[in-house]
Image (spheres, rainbow, N blue to C red):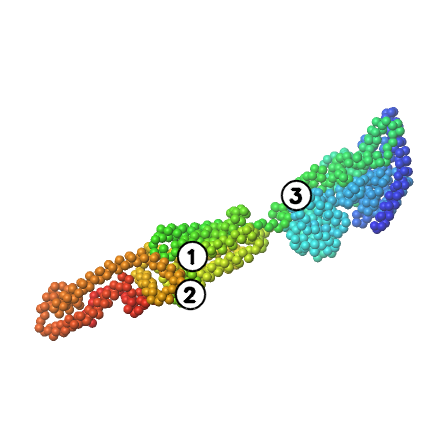
Amino acid sequence: MVESYRETTDEALENAKKLREFMFTERMEYWWKLLNVLTFWELTQVPLCYCLVRHKLPVLWIMPVSGDPARGNITAEVLPAVELALSHLSEQPSPLGNYELQFHLTDSECDNGKALKAFFDTIFNGPKPIMIFGGVCLSVTSILAQSLEGFNLVQLSFAVTAPSLGNKRRFPNFFQTVPSDSAVNVALVRFLRQYGWSRVGTLTQREQKFTEVQRDLSRHLEVANIKLAEAESFSEVPCDCVKKLKDNDVRIVIAHFDVSLAAKVFCCVYNLSMYGQKYQWILPDWTQGSWWTNTDSTNCTAKNILTAIEGSISADIETLSSRHIRGISGRTPQEYEKEYDERRRLKGLGASKFHGFAYDGTWVIAKVLTRVMETVRYRENYSIHRNFTVTDQEVEQMILEAMDKINFFGVTGHIMFQKGERLASVKFAQYQDGKAVDIEQYSAVTDELEFISPIRFQRDKPTKDRTHVYPQRKRISILLYGVVAFLTFLGIFTACSLLVFSVKHHNHWAISMSRPFLNTLIILGAVLSYSSIFFIGLDGSYVSDRVFEVSCSVQISCLSTGCTASFGAMFVKTWKIHSFFKKHSMEKKLPQTTKDYGLGLLVLLLLLIDLSLLICLQILDPLRRTVKEYRIEADPHGQDFFIQPFSERCENTYMGFWMAAFYVYEGILLLSTCFLAWTTRHMNIPAINDSRGIRFSVFVSVPVILIGTYASMLWQDQPNVQFCIVSLVIITCCCSTLCMVFLPKIIIIRMGPDPAFLSRRFHLTQWHSELQKESGQDNDARNILEQDDTGASDFVTDVTQNISLSLDIVLSENLHLRRHINELDAELEDLTRQLNELSPCVMENVIIRGFVHKAVKEKCLTLPESSKSNRNLLEDINSPEHIQRRLSLQLPILHLAYLPSIGGVDSSPLNSPSDSPQHTLMPRTYGVLVTGL
């Protein structure tokens, strides 16, 4: 077929060259006769009807005479329209003067070879055509349109709608009164924009006329910035393509396929539930037939297909204008249609959709030739040559210029050409209740959509062009943030209050003995850790992206520095106590330690390590704002959109590496503190260290941190839960640390220590003195202590200095108590002497009852004689020997009752020389001595 096409094309070009010279001579004679007639008419001014007869202007009409089952007999159906146009031309003042159009019909038979032969026969045998009219078959029309330039002819078609013929480079002399199929695309883009549809899909049948339209539509969509989400094509089975469109969430589908496949397509649409309020189909115009009843090749009923196409929109060229405007013929489109129907019915012909374009095409040829005549006449009148002639090229150029200037209203609407193509008028209709209802009309001349009737959408809203996914930030509840912020403020206020309390009582032994500098670091670390909570709870709903990125660096800096300061200070405290007791108990050689400034340098070293990690993190791989999207969720209220939850995080490129580095460093510090606290769990000396408070604080913080870290990882998809967990971990650790370290000191300062506590302090000093005595007896041991364990001696020296002030107070109180004991001893001796001088009866009453009434004494002195035996017994019991024996046992017991109040015995088990049975703390006794036991 292609080779035959090329051969016929080459042959046509060669014949065109041979005929060119012959045609030029003969056509010049024809135009010369025409000009002579016009000149004679101007000179004589005699009516043409009396002087001249009308000359014929031949126009070659190439059409297939025989009918086509697919398209029908277009030539026979449009012939009444052409005849009607010629009739209307004759009724009006002739625009052509003494000339009239004469169409010479040539049968192309839709065959390239036969069409070319008929064309050349007409050219050679005459009459020579001025223009070519018609053209139905695409292949025949394409061949002739390419040959027109060689013969200086112009063709006007009214039935070919292929977009390829609009290429002016290949077909410069081809024009169409019928808009091409691609003319609908401009209207479609305008229609899509009106309803805000920016994402569409196409379903195209694999045929040339449909694929060309689809390619042209793709170009228009790209220019209009409308996304073509999916372009599917099929041959016979469309269901797979329809399913792909649904899978890709295509809501607006533009279809290009023949009506014979429409039932198959919409049966697939019905089975896949791709219709209704969520989908909008835009189809070709198939309103002229009941195609949905052709369900033989489908498994659907006509009712199913009607259900599927309900609400779909069709877009097609307007074949006959709906406006009631009288056009160039003096008739409205409706009046013309009535006359046309009468003529075709008389001949028993059907109606072709191209009849209006054929009618307007006849008028276009008449208008063009009229303009050419006027141009020729003008040039002849003002020519300086006596024998004025016009060449074929000049005639061709005149016709082309006249075609570009055509502008009138015909029965098919406004007639204008732009680059050889007719500016179209497109009609949009919607299937409503099984009927096509015109809704809008687009005019390419004005580029506007004209409203005809309301379009029907379900829920009274246009269909969405996609499943809209609305982002929804997983934000932290403002109520939760407020509660946590209040608790954090309370914690910071408590920490600051403890700092003020420590500074105010820095001279008290309970504060000065526990390293105030390290206590201050613990408080500052807790404040920094508390402050990080404010930044952890921030997200994009409260601050901008830039501020959020800054908060990422601030929160990790505050939290890391705060933990290092607090746990570093506790680590140094515990390590100092552990090193001293380990040296004293095991007498082993330990590394040399430093004094207060040395402990401060050790904490500073820990802080420098933490600061180095933070600086490297900020320079090499700073934290950035990242958005994590979660699984799309359907609208809980059933609306036609989805929700895309997302949360904002602080992350960097190597997040795992940096978090591992911080966790390892802080973990080593925590575990070391925990280990030292465990080893010193039996060393309970609150007067000189915070071992118990640190131990409890570490034992609470470590499991809370481990559990909280694991829980926050599990709930990282829930920002509220994660924020709550992290905040509780920070608040719990800081609160427990501050309470365990500072609460005992507050109790001691506000309420004072109990006697047992002072007893332990006193014996600690006594123990230190005895240790110094023992070490003084052994010179070798003293050298080892001074040279190899200066840390232990420094520790004891510091303890002695810290308790010196309080010890002076206790010693003065002890001196006062000793004086009071001496006074009591003197009084006790005096009472003993008086007892020895009294009678046995009085002494018995004094010992048994204490101080008694005088009447009791008199009664005792006047006892009868019968009681002499009992009196002798009492005298025997209360003899001086018995009294002396009882006093020797009771007085030491009475004396020991005063020892705890003056720093006497100690009930705590210390590894000191004072641990002996005689120093066992006895319970306090109250009452009087009882004799006769």
Describe the element under mark 1 as helix, strand or loop.
helix
Residue under label 3, please give it: 193
- Disc with the residue nearer the chain's start (3 vs 2): 3
Residue under label 1, please give it: 599
- Position of residue 217 measured from the top left corner of the image (x, y, whole percent): 71, 46
In the rendered image, which quarter contains the C terminus? bottom left
Residue under label 2, please give it: 589
- Position of residue 904 measured from the top left corner of the image (x, y, whole percent): 28, 64
For the point 70% across and 40% down, the residue is: 442
CA separation in Å, label 3 and label 2: 89 Å
- Position of residue 905 measured from the top left corner of the image (x, y, whole percent): 29, 65
Question: Relative to 898, is 523 above or below?
Answer: above
Using the image, tell me which numbered label, if any, was put on residue 590: none
Describe the element under mark 3 as helix, strand or loop.
helix
Q: Nearer the viewer, residue 34 or 431?
A: 34
Q: Count neighbours of disc 3 (C-alpha within 10 A) and say few if under 14, some if 14 to 19, many if 20 or more.
A: some
- Position of residue 189 measured from the top left corner of the image (x, y, whole percent): 68, 44
User: Which amino acid, mark 1?
Assistant: Leu
